[in-house]
Structure formats: structure tokens, C-alpha cells
Amino acid sequence: MTAQELLESLNLLDENERVEAKRAREAGRSLLETICAFANEPCLGGGWLLLGVAPDEQALFPGYAVEGVPHPDQLSADLASQCATVFNLPLRVDIRTETLAGEPVVVVFVPEAAPQDKPIYFKATGLPKGAFRRIGSTDQRCTEDDLVLLYQSRQRESFDAGLVPGAGLEDLDESAIADYRQARADANPDAEELRWSDTELLQALHAVRRDATGAWQPTVAGLLLFGKTAALRRCFPMTRVDYIRVPGREWVPHPDRRFDTVELRAPLASLLRRTQAAVLDDLPKGFGLAEGQLQRSDTPVVPLRALREALVNALMHRSYRVQAPVQVIRYANRLEIRNPGFSLKSPDHLGEPGSMPRNPHIAAVLHETRFAETKGSGIRAMREAMDTAGLVPPLFESDRGQDQFTTLFFFHHFLGEDDIRWLAQFRALHLSDEEARALVVAREANAIDNATYRALNKVDTLTASSALRRLRDAGLFSQQGRGSATWYQPTDRLLGGAPGGLPGKLDALSSKSVPLTSMTEDLSSKPESLSSKSDEDRNALLDEIPGQLAARIGSIGRRHPPEPVRELVVELCSLRAWRAEELALLLSRKPETIRQDYLRPLLAQKRIAMTQPDKPKSPQQAYRSAQGNHLP
């Protein structure tokens, strides 16, 4: 790619995992970390660096401007030398100088390292801290799971192939082995392993292996797949599924708001069936009466196929290094499935063919018994099942910081009559069918990003970016974050027209959605003006805040637990004194909510203080950190 093509790509796309822009006046650590990440990232094919280009801070919306490189020949020579010496293996990168907007810039292509050479890491730092991966448009320090993924291509054993200390063959359950045989016979009656003895079968499945003394012992995969309940409790005390039913639509961590919890622990095949049964028994159901039938048929609000795939993904791809349960949380309007372990596959590529299994031996058994479908198809199967049922598409979040993956299903019938009526208020925007779908999803989830838009409408990244920016410019979305961390939050203009809560359709799944084409007469004319005054005021406040803190504020949703938001308030108040109205604008909440849920508890804890304590109700009242040194 040329420098001009790279710059156009940066300015057109809201995220770009293969292109990075840097001022880079010298071959510093940040530049080398990006090179390390490009070389390591599996299946990325390397990446491009455009040096001498930086974010345009004066632009209304994120963009990039050419600054130039003062000494491009020296930078190129230093960079080539550093790539050859600072890493555990020499990296040969392609470096050239071009002219852009009359200024010299340096273009660098970093090829992906061969599988047998990964991980690439800084020699002086060593592993794991010296290795990086490319996640979206960020360079992330490798975790232990990342290193396992990189080493797997070099035949290093996975975690589920390891032995379980203190476990013996007596901890394996014969009934679980018989259950596997039955499931395997159902999938393939002619499977060769059905003729083997239990011992031979366990060895072939990597369920057992020899220890240092030569004795056979269960592996992690073997105990999780075939272990007795008592052994699972002893060796993996937190490796279970918690099914939690929460009253209402929000998690309320107060002792007077009880919720029901069912703890499930069993060998994986049985655990999957029991969890699925527990959830299905409790989900709202719609009913229909087919023509010619005398009995009605009940249909769960979340399609069985989508639920099964989500549960299989959670148990198959979870991190068993982390002693934490899989949580299935049933709210009044949605179902959330959370499992320990972020996705080893980049969030940008979820749903694409190909799988990066964290637990390959467990995955193999689940595939052979048809609990899991074709490798890499789970996300796509969920999306297709929800689309066929006319429901809001599932949302997925891979959180490396909390080492967690979340699947979210809404119980909302997609684009029914209520949605069409709601969308009609935006007739002046001349919405396309795809944009209308995006508005409905954003209203339900309180957020949308490029990947969700692509999955929802089956379009490419550029088309999704253009549509999301148009909705942003029309004042319906406010843009948060930068690069691949970009996401869009509904503005008050969008939510102000939303009905109170989700439409009451949980018992009406048999009703048909009104086609999008039926509302095209109402959705016509010209787009309206750019973002609202409140968005401009919020952006002005964000400009006062350091970048990292501003990014954290941008990631806070309306459903975020209160304690992390209070921590943000304390950090903000350490910068300067803030009025409640300013904090409300920054955090996208109502001023009264700010006062009751955040300021009052922090004042009680003496973590913040009023600037006018003698006039608590003064319109000019502001709040500062109790330990800060600011002036009122």
C-alpha cells in the first residue's frame, strides 16, 4: 500500500487492525511494540505503519493529519537496526520513504512471523511481558493464554492436556464415559473408537496420560469431561455454571433485592444438558397454532440453537486456569452468558470461519459428539438463529481487561409494529433499511459498534463506518473512543423518542414483523444537522481530561455498576472541581442520578468535598477530591 492509500484508510475507517499511524520522530519503544504485535498476531498477515502522521486534534471528529518526519533516512536506518537486534529473533521489515502533502513520511510493512518463530518478544524484557499481540488497533501485552495460543503452533501442549494434581483414575465416572459412547454413536455409529476399551478410549481422547512415575493419571480435559462430581468439586471448586435469575432489568447489588441462583456442576456433556434445561424451563415462551393442528406449540424466546451454541462456546472456550464460574444471568428483558477468558480470536473476526480453541482436547470431544457444530461457526449460528426468529441479533463482548467473554440475547422481537412506529419519527433522515435496524439495536443495547453493524446488515467495514458516521452526524449517536475501540452511544435525541422500556412482546412470538419496506414512505427527505449542542458540550469537557481517563469515561454505559463510576468521579474531582450538571453530561446520566447514586455516597465516605459546604444547595455548588489541592 502507498502512503496515500494508508492515510485514506485511516480517515475512512473507524478502526483498522492492520494500519497504525504514529508521529515517530525516533525508533522508540511504542513503535517497536507495534512491530512486535504485528509480527505475532495469528492470521493477520502482518501490518502497516505510517510514520509522520498523527491524530488531528483540531478536527471535530477523529481524523489524521500529515506532520512529516524530520530525518526520514536516519529513522529508517535506526528502525532497521532495532528490528534486527532488540527482539529474540531478527525481524526483517520493509521500510521506504514517500512524500505526502509535501512532507516526507516513512511507510513500514511488518510481515507476520512464521508459526515456529512465535512468540516474538523483547530480549531485554523476556516473557511474558516482552511479547505483544495486535488486538484491534491496540498493542496488548501477551497474557499466559496468548502465549499458549502462540506456542500451540509449535506443538507445545495446551492447558487442558496437563495433569491434575491429586487426581486419580478412580475420579473418573464410568457413567460419563458411557454417556460419551452413546453421544458418539448417535453422531457416527461406525466410529472406530466405539470398539475400543475404556482405557484405550481415554488414552486416545487425551483424557489420561502418564505421570513422571509412568502411572496413568487424568488430565484437565479428562476430569472435566468424565470426572465424578466430588472430584470436580475438589479439584475445580469454582468451575461450575451459576444460573441467576434477577428481578427487573438491572443488577442491583443490595441485600434487600434478592435473586435466585442455581449452581450446576457435572461432567461437561451432562452440564451442558442440565444448564440448557434449566434456562429453557425458565425462559418466557411464545405460542403458535399451526394450520391443521389441534395443539399449540410453545417456543422459547431465545431459539434453542442459539442458546445451545452460546452455552457450548462458554464451556468449550472458557479459561479453566481461572477459578470462576460461568454465569448465565436471566433478566426480565435479556439473557447474559459470561465466561472467564477473553476471546483468543480478534473481536473484529468473530463469526468468520476458523477457530482458535483455548482447550483443543475438550473442543475435539464436543465436536465429535455434535454438541458443537463445524469449527468456528458458533457465533454465526447464533446470529442466524436469532435472525430467523425475528429477534434482535446477539451481542458479543470480549474484555481482555476483566478476562471475560459475554454473550447477550435480548427478548425483543425485531422490527415489529412498535419499532416501525418508533422509527417513523425519524422520517426526515431518509433512513435505509440497514440504518433503521442499527437504531433499534442501539436503542436496546445502549451502544453499537462497527462489528455489530456489519454482522447485523452483512456489509463490509467501510460501508458500516460510513453509515455509523451518518447517524452520528445526524445527532442520533455520539462517538466514543478511537481506532478499533470506537463505539457509538445513542444520544438523548434518539432515546428521547423511545418507548418506556421494551415493547411487551414476550408472549407474542408468533406475530409477524412489519417489513422495513412498509415504512419507506414515511422515512424520506433530507438528513438533519450535525450532533446536538449537548454532544458538543460533552466533547469540550472531555478535551480537558487526560486521554486514558477520557477513554474510560467513554466506555462507561448506562448499565455500569455504580462502584466503578464512583471511582471515576473521584478521579475527575482530583483534576478540578465539577458541578453535578457537568458530571451528568460527562457520564451520560441525569443530574439527580449523579447526586443520589454517586456524590452523596462519596461525600458520606469523605472521599470528595463540597466547594461551598456552607451553601449545600447553591446553584454554583461543585465537588472536589477531599485530598486534592485545587482551589474552589
Image: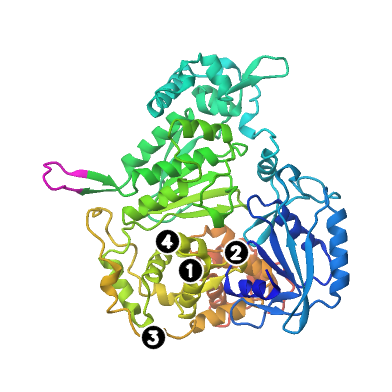
**Mark sitting earlier along the chain (4/1):** 4
Tell me the residue that label 2 is attached to: 484
| 607 over 406 or under it: above or below | below
Tell me the residue that label 4 is attached to: 456
**Mark sitting earlier along the chain (2/3):** 2
Q: CA distance from mark 3 to mark 1?
A: 36 Å
Name which residue type carries label 4: Leu
**Mark sitting earlier along the chain (2/1):** 2
| 454 over 497 or under it: above or below | above
Q: Residues within 10 Å of mark 1 (few under 14, many from 20)?
A: few
Q: How is the image coloured?
A: rainbow
| Residue 16 visible in the displayed image | yes
Tell me the residue that label 3 is attached to: 526
Q: Circle 3 — which element?
A: loop
Q: Residues within 10 Å of mark 3 (few under 14, many from 20)?
A: few
Q: CA distance from mark 4 to mark 1?
A: 33 Å
Q: Quadrant of the N terminus?
A: bottom right
Q: Residue at x 51, y 24 (%)?
A: 226
Residue 502 is left or right of residue 403, and the answer is: left
Name the front one of labels 2 and 1.
Answer: 2
Q: Circle 2 — which element?
A: helix
What range is drawn magenta here? 288-297
**Mark sitting earlier along the chain (2/4):** 4
| 624 over 363 or under it: above or below | below
